[in-house]
Image (cartoon, helix red, strand yellow):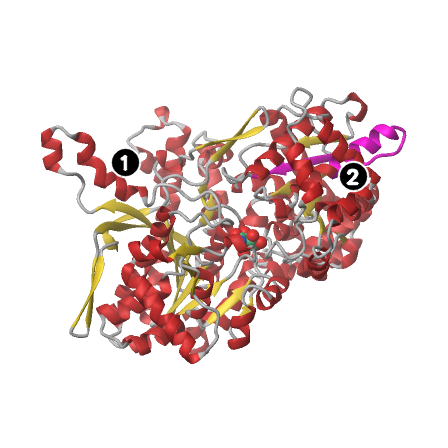
Amino acid sequence: MKDDILNRLQFSLGKDADHASVYDWRMAVSLTVRDQMVDTWFNSTKEAYAASSKRVYYLSMEFLIGRLIEDMISNLQLEDTVRGALTDLGQDFDEIVHDEPDAALGNGGLGRLAACFMDSLATLGIPAFGYGIRYEHGLFEQSFAQGQQVERPETWLNQRHAWEFERPEVQFPICFGGHVDHHDGKTTWHPSEKVLATAYDTPVIGWKNEWGNTLRLWSAEPVSQFDLDSFNRGDYLAAGRSEALARTISRVLYPDDTTDSGKELRLKQEYFFTAASIQDLMRRYLQDHDDLRQLPEHVAIQLNDTHPAIAGPELVRVLVDEHGIDMAEAIPLARACLAYTNHTLLPEALEKWGEWLLGRILPRHLEIIRIIEETQQREHPGSPRILEHGDVRMGELAFIMAHKVNGVSALHTELVKETVFADLHRIHPTRIINQTNGITPRRWLYNCNPGLRDLITDAMGDGWVADLEQLTALKAKRDDAAFMQAFQASKRDNKAALSNWIGQTCGIALDPDAMFDVQIKRIHEYKRQLMNLLETVALWNDMRDNPDHDWTPRVKIFGGKAAPGYYMAKDIIRLINDVAEVINNDPATKGRLKIVYPPNYNVTMAERLIPASDLSEQISTAGKEASGTGNMKFALNGALTIGTLDGANVEIREHVGSENFFLFGLTAAEVMERRQHHGYARAAIEASPRLQRVLGQIAEGRFAPHDTGRYHGVVGMLYDHDYFLVTCDFDSYFDAQRRADNAYQNADNWAAMALMNTASMGWFSSDRTIKGYARDIWNAHPPRAAMDRSA
Ligand code: CBF
């Protein structure tokens, strides 16, 4: 390993050890580790071909992979070797790991889920490709200026990405615009614009280096680099124009996955990566097969939300226009390959494209969508329409073109059946199924929490890493005093490490014995960071009113970004920072209450915060959070949840036991019912003196003394259109927080509850989720398992 690293340093980076920077060392280590994956990766490809395996194609606009170095090293079981080699070379392993920039190619849960799924697919040995976009700039970098969010472009590709292989030979033309001709029964699309999609492959190697799949990300390039005539005339801007336009397609990640951006560029991005992926998978299929009617036996295409929903019409177009299959046959054939995951019920997030816009950019696809619509109406008269009020509704299109549609938690799936797709569900009663989300234990325990990992492994071996349900054996350790002490110590160590980091980065001193209460996720009204903050102010008031009470010391930690155009969310960020300024400087509550909001929350920060958390805030308005996956990461790492009956919280509570979960708030049914009552928010505020006082303080400018009107909009919203029922759940939330305070005072009992959380979370491994998709949706199998069965 040492020699390999030095060779890489010398021959790939052109550096000698005496002059190498941390970046050089990291690249040398990463390239060395990457070399060690290649055999497994090649062998897996060969095996999949030899077994003529069905392949899974996971199409996702987002893969929030974060840093890869630790995953790669641990999945290859090279931790000790790499650490040892670096120590011998006089280098610091941790410094090198932390030098890797986060690949922030996603907004939040949906993108991180895709990354966990890639890890599980490889660990389970299921042949799969992840297909997405190689954004030059991932999710923006967040900083705070006077408490306000400031966005700056993210620049992960300013450095070389160590893990990818560029594939200039894997390149497909992607067309837009123009018109369509119908002549003698033949249809021809004459596009007006063309770009090239070039593949960049990252090997994804599963646990213990047994199987390797590929994450293939597409980058947009111009068909011709620049216009020489314009250049020769001295018109340099014109010479580079078409190149710049083409590259724009993969330049930036759209910084929001929950609002309909309605932007032409986004539609082009969606078609760009979907069309490239379909060309690629068709090419692979046709290498070995000549009968397209067998396609569904070899190809499973999963649509991660509606973003790649254009895959339906695109696959039909390829089958009909390029391979001469009848439209009537092509539609069901495409459907048999396609499945769609719904990730949200928020109406604004169900994508719609103006018919005029889609028709201008993808004229042939609009024709095909009309045919799909006619076919659906003929077969199921009165079916909900794809085309309505001049819009193309991508949710309906995805549903109609999928043979299975899945929700991401039990509650969410029921709500999908009852609300957004109720009419389609009546027509296709077996199409909607549930696959509750999961998280990879490799990243979300093994790598991010080495203290707890080693404790568990010492107690029961490392079988749990690929079979997380084995953690149930930990329940018996509840009465093992030495184990429990070590369990508590590992949490204390993580909290001390986090305190150091926060001291260094935010300049705030924390007491590691205080309760670390953490809410990290996108800032959105439905996730109710505002309710958490109002409760913090109420607690502060109570602490000041009753200074002699035995208060449980608290550290409230927030992390998350708001979409740049989401003004209410940005006001909430500013309010958190303003409140923090006042409370953190109040001598009356010193040592008892602190608020910390480290800027630029990302995957790496989550890996730092989650293992150090005592209390996990999962407090969305019931019925709004489809699943959540952060909730799973916290519970697995021994944090207790304070939460509503929303998304996967419901199933987490069932698994960990209601006595180990702080429940509060209205249920989804009660939320819908409450909204029918006129003036429900005012009534709730009037019934809660505590809340009234907090809102009064905010409205008077207690936290913005030089700009007293700053939060009138926020307070006014709560009185007049509190759609997410912060006011109605406030008292119940405050009470649940006090139950948490009391429970925390008994450290041993708290630790036992925390252990029950860790021990009960095995079911939430993404390995279980992927097995469910493979069985119920894809009918895909690991070729090795097939070989084992026949042996
Ligand atoms: O299913 C993964 C996650 O997706 C979202 O983040 C999304 O983008 N729609 C949901 O909001 C989460 O609840 C869900 O866990």
Amino acid on which the number 1 mark rests in the picture: Phe
Q: Residue at x 76, y 32 (%)?
A: 696
Q: Earlier in the sequence, mark 2 or mark 1?
A: 1
**Which mark lies nearer to you, 2 or 1?**
2
Q: Position of residue 380 (x, y in %)?
A: 46, 78
Residue 126 location, quadrant: bottom left
Q: Amino acid at mark 2?
A: Leu
Within-10-Å neighbours for mark 1: few <14, some 14–19, many 20+: few
Region rendered in magenta: 535-560
Q: Which corner quadrant of the image does residue 346 belong to?
A: bottom right
User: Quick one: SS at disc 1?
Assistant: helix
Circle 2 Cα neighbour tier, 10 Å, few/some/many (<14 / 14–19 / ≥20): many
Q: If the image is split into quadrants, where does the N terminus sit?
A: top left
The residue tagged 1 is: 11
In the picture shown, does residue 494 fall above or below 509?
below
Residue 483 shows in the view: no
Q: Is residue 373 visible?
A: yes
Quarter of the image containing the C terminus? bottom left
SS for callout 2: helix
The alpha-carbon separation of the residues under discs 2 and 1 comes to 65 Å
Q: Say whether residue 340 is left or right of residue 734.
A: left
